[in-house]
Image: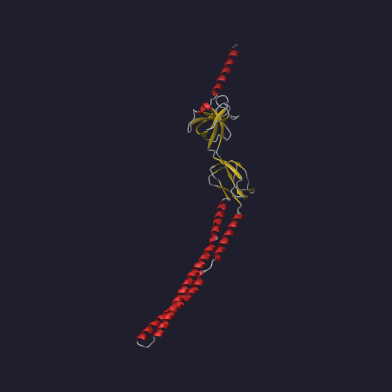
Amino acid sequence: MKKIITGMAIIATFLTACNGNKVNYDASGTFEVDEVIVSAELTGKLLSFDVREGDSIAKDKPVGTIDAENLSLQKDQVQASIEALREKTSDLSPQVKLLQDQLAVQQSQLDRLTREKQRTENLLKQDAATGKQLDDLNAEIDVVKKQMLVTQQQINVQRSNVGTQNRSILSEGKPLEKRVAQLDDQLKRASITNPISGTVITKYAEAGEMTAAGKALYKIADLSTMNLRAYISGTQLSQVKLNQPVKVLIDNGANSYREYPGVITWISDKAEFTPKTIQTKEERANLVYAVKVRVKNDGFIKIGMYGEVKL
């Protein structure tokens, strides 16, 4: 009889201990993280790709290079075309120099005729020259002045024509300069730069492989904080609000839990049918609302792990 009583006492103690380890929760779900899929921005061969799954990579760190030799050659070709345009432009100096020399000769003639006119006027006052001589000099001076005016107009026209021609040729270079800038931008994209600080989750390519613009190379995420996507029933919806602190529990062995502080960062505005793998506090409801709880990760929380929420 004493053995029976002792056995019953042990069983009662065990059941009490089991009930003591039972933890009530208001909602449960799985942990997820904001993932970034890094894709190639050019088509070409991966010359280098220094990424391994599980690596922690800093933001803006170069992690690989795509072969962009073709783009580099295109840039050289466009720059050569720009240089060729400059060689097509006309040099104004020789043509204008010729006309300016002619204008200088005409100016010298005008100066000589002006001096002769002055002497003739003096002689005419002394009756040593005739009026016809003075008239002839004035006519010659008038002709030279008109010649000088024509020469100056020729210089202006020559400058205008050559300037218009050169501007027309050089205007063809503006689209080419834009093309060079475009190629420079594409050449920068040949360097694969990590966009965020985080841990590489999945690697999709290897060095030496061909890639294409938009093709995924690797997936990275910041695992320092995790999101628990849990589901609450309609009756619980009125008990939650954004930025509300809650407790998050994860399994720690068979009969214990790890507890973390969390904050509700998102509440769905639409009801949905209860996912098959999710249980709410009550029996499965037909419609539930999804919430996200942000939790600081100490390394024990993994993507896809189940967690519970206590409101």
Most extreme residue toward the right, as rendered? 209
- Is residue 174 visible from the viewing direction of this image? yes
Colour mapping: secondary structure
Most extreme residue toward the left, as rendered? 126
What x and y, as percent, mark residue 13?
56, 19
Q: Residue at x 41, y 85 (%)?
A: 132
What x and y, as percent, mark residue 54?
58, 40
Q: Residue at x 51, y 67 (%)?
A: 161
What x and y, as percent, mark residue 277?
60, 29
Q: Residue at x 49, y 68 (%)?
A: 159
> In this orientation, which residue lies closer to the viewer: 128 or 3?
128
Q: How many marks?
A: 0
**Where does the N terminus fall, quadrant-wise?**
top right
- Is residue 250 visible from the viewing direction of this image? no
What x and y, as percent, mark residue 181?
54, 55
Q: Residue at x 54, y 60 (%)?
A: 173
> In this orientation, which residue lies closer to the viewer: 229 or 19?
229
Q: Is residue 150 above or below residue 178?
A: below
Locate residue 3: give its quadrant: top right
Q: Is residue 126 left or right of residue 251?
A: left
Q: Is residue 64 above or below residue 149?
A: above
Most extreme residue toward the bottom, as rendered? 128
Q: Is residue 203 above or below residue 150?
A: above
> In this orientation, which residue lies closer to the viewer: 251 or 294?
294
> In this orientation, which residue lies closer to the viewer: 254 or 62?
62
